[in-house]
Amino acid sequence: MTLGDLVLTGDQEGEIKKLMKAIEHREYLADIGLREIGKILFVGPPGTGKTTVSRALAHELSLPFVEVKLSMITSQYLGETAKNVEKTFEVAKRLSPCILFIDEFDSVAKTRRSDEHAALKRAVNTLLKSIDDISLIRDEVILIGATNHPDQLDAAAWRRFDEIVNFPRPDEAMRADILRIITERMEIAEFDPVEVAELTQGLTGSDLRMVLREAVLEALAEERTALTQQDIVNAVEEFEERDNLKNMNMMDDSDQMIAGDGGDSHGHTHQH
């Protein structure tokens, strides 16, 4: 994926341009004493392109891409977590210039709240210190953090990023553009991305990709490689049914299943 293949909001485009300029002119920034730069936090629900944009940026800049999920380095042996954090940052420094992408950035903050264990505090402090110690200007490492739960990040972590970029669910126009890109190499009779965009409110880029995958596989099951608009509309309905399943509340003590939509239409709420 290159940045040109992506559908971005104006805000996202602006922030990426700024970052690319900062990399290009890092000597100038060092000269004028601006060192706190090149640490960015991507915030938004899953499937809105946080990882994809980071990878495309690495591709665009021809930089190695180091991807870490914080939940994966949070070890059950708490003492190890701090070591793992340090190792991650060491690897990034060795590979520099590079992009260090830390996903699930909230996972440490979450654990921190639930358990004020001394070792865990140490791990969080190691993370914060590692972020402080890494620098685009000095180490040539760009740090991109990503989180689906900005509410769970504590102020200390939040403060360490010089830019916060919002990744919202795409609006209708963005969904139509995303659909045009996904279907570029597909043959679809009477394809109307605008109609599909209208039907898919609330869906993310990765949801739309799944919808099209479903449509393609359904057609293949009928030995067809040419799709129709109807195939895609049907796949949207399939996806929504599947989405309802995802929200289903499996009752422990009976065979009864309740689809919990979070709404209180029946006079009772479901516990998720």
Image (cartoon, helix red, strand yellow):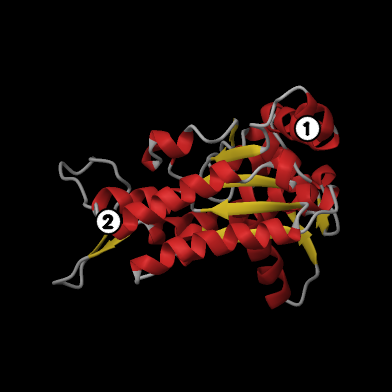
Screen quadrant of the N terminus: bottom right
x, y percent for residue 111: 32, 54
- Residue denoted by label 2: 118
> Dot 1, how many residues are within 10 Å of its Cα: few (below 14), some (14-19), or many (20+)?
some
Position of 35 with respect to 118 (left or right) is right
Looking at the picture, tell me which residue is in the foreground, 232 or 206: 206
Q: Please state the horizontal and vertical placement of residue 109, each as a whole percent of the image.
A: 37, 48
State how far apart marks 2 and 1 are (Cα): 38 Å
Q: Nearer the viewer, mark 2 or mark 1?
A: 2
In the rendered view, tell whether residue 212 sits above or below residue 60. below
x, y percentage for residue 163?
61, 31
Lower sequence index among marks 2 and 1? 1
Of all residues, the one furthest to the top in this rendering is 32
The type of residue carrying mark 2 is: Ala
User: Which dot marks residue 3?
Assistant: none
Residue at the disc numbered 1: 22
Left or right: 127, with 94 as reference point: left
When the figure is inspected, residue 89 is found, relative to residue 128, above or below; the finding is below
Relative vertical location of residue 186 with respect to residue 136 in this rendering, above or below: below
Residue at point 74%, 27% (across, down) = 14
Any part of residue 103 in sight: yes
Q: Cβ–Cβ below 8 Å for labels 2 and 1? A: no
Observer-nearest residue: 254 or 163? 163
Q: Secondary structure at mark 1?
A: helix
Quadrant of res 23: top right
Residue 193 in view, yes or no:
no
Q: Amino acid at mark 1?
A: Ala
